[in-house]
């Protein structure tokens, strides 16, 4: 952070001026005085009155049958997974780290998801099993692509479902933080005409260089990129960079401390969630954030790997939940993965690509509990040998978009799809 | 035994490679750089910009002497190009040319993995920057992405794969390339073909060899084909401790009959099943199209002109996948000629270009490797099998742009001396003593030509921002100008 120039001097050339966007209805008194507030010119209406949406993309195909164990299905599950099955709750001889945590007498959470049990009991966690994208592809790249573009099976869609939501929304939001993709590459679901910010670290988001040259260099660079009147996609990006530098500079000026003893995992995923929380509290106009979670492609030696990946997920979601506290009333988090995994384990004590999976939805507006139309694990109940899908992932997203994000334009966001109401979230 | 070889990447962008449908980043508004050398046509400069990692004055002089077609042929016959700098470099470093057994032994020692990783990664960067065989190095990079294997957890295997598979076949014939890749211990491990046995087939490699290496996801294969190909590959394995670790275990092989892509593979065979499958895949017209499209994307444009994809696929098919001939066709095509400035430099391209043009003395490769890591393109570090994305859209975002600017500014900063990077900008731009000669010389060195007048003026204004250029200010402003040019839009496109 050494070579930082005075941002005020630069703010003069940046495009964003000052004004207020009231977004979340959060009581400012809830946050410490030192927490900087960003401000944006309010061009038309007052911005979104809906939840902040956080989408967690689990890359690799999470094993939903390990995350949420259908232990009461008995025989089939245990026969097909002789070495990697999770024991039923209250099994004798079971260690705490391989015994499911009961949810409803039929399903149990993987023990590594223990941090989420309290959230579940507080009715802020919805668990939807046998969910996913109906496209039969078992290819990571295809399945993820279809899922993120929101039109499974259709290769012609050029943008992501979240971008279509932002594009079709009835309100305006000029904030550069309207849509944030955590990481170095913007998620496909965010791709499209509405600009999204790719962000990896708030603290590092500034130009580095010789103190005495930096202001002049930055000015020259902006000029070379025509940042004030961009003639190209690159110029537009450059403009975004300069605006964001100015604004994040203020945010980075003070150290962020999570509230309520929330402890995020010390991983990229944890850092991503923490920064999203920071952006939410700073009221910068964030509407949607995307973050990636990895370690799910458990083709061999699944047991320790799924425990580690679920541990990180559970700890991260719990930390986010605790850190945001009462703000969770205005936040919805949803997880999804491109497909689940096969019921039977393979020869390497792992699992290969399957179909039906688990989605989690967390937030103050959630109807907590299990929302599963369980198809069963008997051979005649499977889809091509794998767990079937009885809840299209777009049913879950459509409900969130209409009831929590307050955008009714489902025909634009999920063209060619008629969602089924599932009762997973309540209307705002 | 390495644990988690197929650790899936946390980063997104995996689907960015599929962005060809209606999602192009237009480059209009980017200004082309004028031809530098007297007598060099814009076409020749454009060719140089695509078949080298960056255009030095000596490259421009060479193509001026030879003419474009002869230059292409010269570069394609890479084995005949003397490469003294790289030869000396390889001779002086102890790891890159170790045998498989030596490499495996080193990997087992404490930090052995890291040493191999660092050595092979640095060799990759060094060769790209300083080899005379520039086009060959670009082809190596293309195939490294195409047959992607991350080096993490597989350092010895991937180090050998780089040398014996990728570099051996990068300008060879595709059929032999495919077999070498299929037999590479790195590939076998990475895509779990060593766990693929008759009793429990593992479909991972079978799927990726069709989806990513040959036919492409639209190539017309079915899930049944994936399963049958997996059966064909059963028994394929690795035996540690051997000089050639690949082996075929007949007992683990499923020798029943198979039907793949309409072909029947009779029962009772062993390794012939695989050789048969690889023939089918290599010769398939979808393979010719898939590979041609990728090559056109890499060397021409993010929106590959269909006419060039088609004609290139034709050459691929009629020459049985002769990569040299395919490239010769591509590089001499009219579509190629019309694509000036349309490719966006990926982080590796960017860093290599900086090195190639400024030739610093480096005490240690660490700061360069660190820079690549920060920018998200460490060599051999893309975890899924599809390789680093090849579209401007994947790399051109706010985060990526800021990191690029910071890399350029850090690269020229005088604090680089503490990191072991020693520049000699005074030698590279010896005559600069006025603001205008400084800016013009720097533009010639870094951009290969002059900027547009309005941009040249902005850079001049930077130089005289604090007053007329003094002898004291010169080194500071000189470094600043070089950094600015490397961060400028001009340097991001080629």
Image: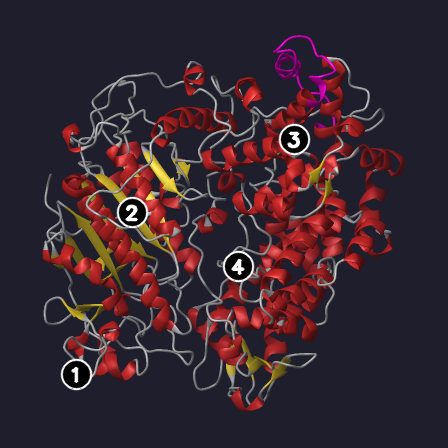
Judged from the image, the secondary structure of the residue bearing numbered disc 4 is loop
Q: Which mark is residue B216?
A: 4
Mark 4 → mark 1, Cα distance in angstroms = 50 Å
- From the viewer's perspective, is residue A419 above or below residue B172? above
Judged from the image, the secondary structure of the residue bearing numbered disc 1 is loop
Q: Which residue is mark 2?
A: A55
Q: Which residue is mark 1?
A: A92
Q: Which residue is mark 3?
A: B414
Callouts 1 and 2 in the same chain: yes
Taking A399 as reference, is A355 left or right? right
Mark 1 → mark 3, Cα distance in angstroms = 67 Å
Mark 3 → mark 2, Cα distance in angstroms = 43 Å
Which residue is the extreme one toward the top?
B467
Q: Position of residue A13 (x, y in %)?
A: 45, 15
**Residue B43 lies in the magenta-colored region:** no
Q: Mark 3 vs mark 4: give the one in front.
A: 3
Q: Which residues are magenta?
A: B447-475
Q: Position of residue A321 (x, y in %)?
A: 20, 48
How dense is the environment of label 4, judged by Cα within 10 Å: few (below 14), some, or many (20 and up)?
some
How dense is the environment of label 2, judged by Cα within 10 Å: few (below 14), some, or many (20 and up)?
many
């Amino acid at each position: 952070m050494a070579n930082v120039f005075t941002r005020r001097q630069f703010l003069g050339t940046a495009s964003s001026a000052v004004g207020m966007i009231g977004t979340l209805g959060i009581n400012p008194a809830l946050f410490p005085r030192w927490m900087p507030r960003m401000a944006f010119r309010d061009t038309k209406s007052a911005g979104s009155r809906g939840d902040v949406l956080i989408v967690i993309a689990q890359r690799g195909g999470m094993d939903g049958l390990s995350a949420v164990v259908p232990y009461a299905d008995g025989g089939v599950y245990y026969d097909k997974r002789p070495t990697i099955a999770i024991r039923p709750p209250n099994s004798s001889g079971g260690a705490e780290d391989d015994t499911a945590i009961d949810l409803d007498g039929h399903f149990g959470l993987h023990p590594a998801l223990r941090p989420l049990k309290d959230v579940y009991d507080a009715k802020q966690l919805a668990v939807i099993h046998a969910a996913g994208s109906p496209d039969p592809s078992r290819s990571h790249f295809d399945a993820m692509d279809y899922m993120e573009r929101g039109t499974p099976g259709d290769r012609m869609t050029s943008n992501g479902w979240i971008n279509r939501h932002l594009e079709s929304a009835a309100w305006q939001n000029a904030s550069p933080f309207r849509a944030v993709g955590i990481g170095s590459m913007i998620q496909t679901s965010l791709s499209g005409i509405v600009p999204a910010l790719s962000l990896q670290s708030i603290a590092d988001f500034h130009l580095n260089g010789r103190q005495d040259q930096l202001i002049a260099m930055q000015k020259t660079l902006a000029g070379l990129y025509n940042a004030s009147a961009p003639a190209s996609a690159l110029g537009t990006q450059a403009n975004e960079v300069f605006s964001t530098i100015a604004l994040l500079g203020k945010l980075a000026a003070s150290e962020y401390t999570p509230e309520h003893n929330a402890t995020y995992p010390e991983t990229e995923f944890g850092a991503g969630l923490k920064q999203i929380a920071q952006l939410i509290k700073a009221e910068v106009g964030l509407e949607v954030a995307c973050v990636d979670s990895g370690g799910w492609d458990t083709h061999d030696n699944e047991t320790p790997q799924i425990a580690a990946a679920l541990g990180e997920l559970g700890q991260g979601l719990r930390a986010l939940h605790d850190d945001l506290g009462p703000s969770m009333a205005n936040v919805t988090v949803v997880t999804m993965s491109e497909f689940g995994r096969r019921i039977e384990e393979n020869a390497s004590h792992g699992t290969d690509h399957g179909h039906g999976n688990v989605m989690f939805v967390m937030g103050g507006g959630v109807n907590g509990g299990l929302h599963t139309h369980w198809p069963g694990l008997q051979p005649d109940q499977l889809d091509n040998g794998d767990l079937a899908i009885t809840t299209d992932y777009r049913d879950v997203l459509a409900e969130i978009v209409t009831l929590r994000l307050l955008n009714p334009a489902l025909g634009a966001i999920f063209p060619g799809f008629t969602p089924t109401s599932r009762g997973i979230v309540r209307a705002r | 035994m390495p644990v988690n070889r197929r650790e899936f990447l946390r980063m997104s962008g995996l689907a960015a490679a599929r962005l060809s449908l209606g999602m192009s980043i237009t480059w209009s508004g980017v200004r082309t750089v004028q031809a530098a050398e007297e007598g060099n046509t814009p076409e020749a400069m454009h060719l140089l910009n695509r078949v080298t990692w960056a255009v030095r004055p000596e490259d421009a002089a060479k193509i001026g002497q030879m003419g474009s077609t002869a230059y292409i042929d010269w570069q394609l016959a890479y084995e005949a190009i003397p490469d003294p700098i790289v030869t000396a470099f390889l001779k002086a470093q102890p790891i890159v040319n170790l045998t498989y057994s030596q490499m495996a032994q080193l990997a087992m020692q404490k930090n052995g993995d890291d040493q191999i990783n660092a050595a092979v990664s640095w060799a990759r960067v060094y060769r790209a920057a300083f080899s005379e065989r520039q086009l060959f190095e670009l082809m190596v990079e293309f195939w490294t992405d195409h047959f992607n294997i991350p080096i993490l957890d597989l350092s010895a295997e991937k180090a050998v794969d780089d040398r014996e598979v990728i570099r051996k076949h990068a300008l060879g014939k595709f059929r032999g390339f495919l077999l070498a890749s299929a037999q590479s211990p790195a590939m076998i491990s990475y895509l779990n073909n060593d766990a693929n046995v008759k009793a429990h087939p593992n479909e991972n490699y079978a799927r990726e060899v069709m989806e990513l290496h040959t036919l492409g996801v639209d190539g017309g294969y079915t899930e049944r084909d994936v399963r049958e190909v997996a059966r064909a590959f059963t028994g394929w394995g690795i035996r540690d401790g051997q000089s050639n670790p690949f082996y075929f275990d007949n007992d683990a092989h499923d020798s029943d009959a198979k039907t793949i892509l309409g072909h029947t593979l009779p029962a009772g065979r062993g390794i012939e099943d695989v050789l048969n499958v690889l023939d089918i895949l290599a010769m398939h017209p979808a393979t010719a199209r898939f590979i041609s499209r990728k090559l056109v994307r890499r060397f021409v444009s993010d929106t590959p002109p269909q006419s060039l994809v088609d004609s290139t696929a034709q050459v691929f098919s009629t020459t049985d996948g002769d990569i040299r001939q395919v490239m010769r066709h591509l590089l001499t095509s009219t579509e190629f000629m019309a694509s000036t400035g349309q490719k966006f430099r990926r982080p590796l391209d960017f860093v290599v270009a900086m090195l190639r043009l400024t030739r610093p003395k480096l005490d240690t490769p660490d700061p360069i490797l660190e820079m690549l890591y920060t920018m998200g393109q460490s060599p051999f570090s893309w975890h899924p099998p599809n390789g680093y994305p090849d579209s401007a859209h994947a790399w051109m975002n706010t985060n990526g742009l800021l990191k690029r600017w910071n890399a350029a500014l850090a690269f020229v900063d005088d604090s680089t001396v503490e990191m072991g990077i020693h520049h000699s900008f005074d030698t590279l731009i010896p005559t600069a003593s006025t603001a205008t000669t400084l800016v013009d010389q720097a533009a010639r060195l870094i951009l290969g030509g002059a900027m547009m007048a309005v941009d040249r003026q902005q850079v001049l204004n930077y130089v005289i921002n604090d007053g007329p250029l003094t002898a004291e200010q010169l080194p500071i402003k000189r470094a600043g100008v070089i950094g600015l040019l490397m961060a400028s839009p001009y340097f991001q496109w080629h």
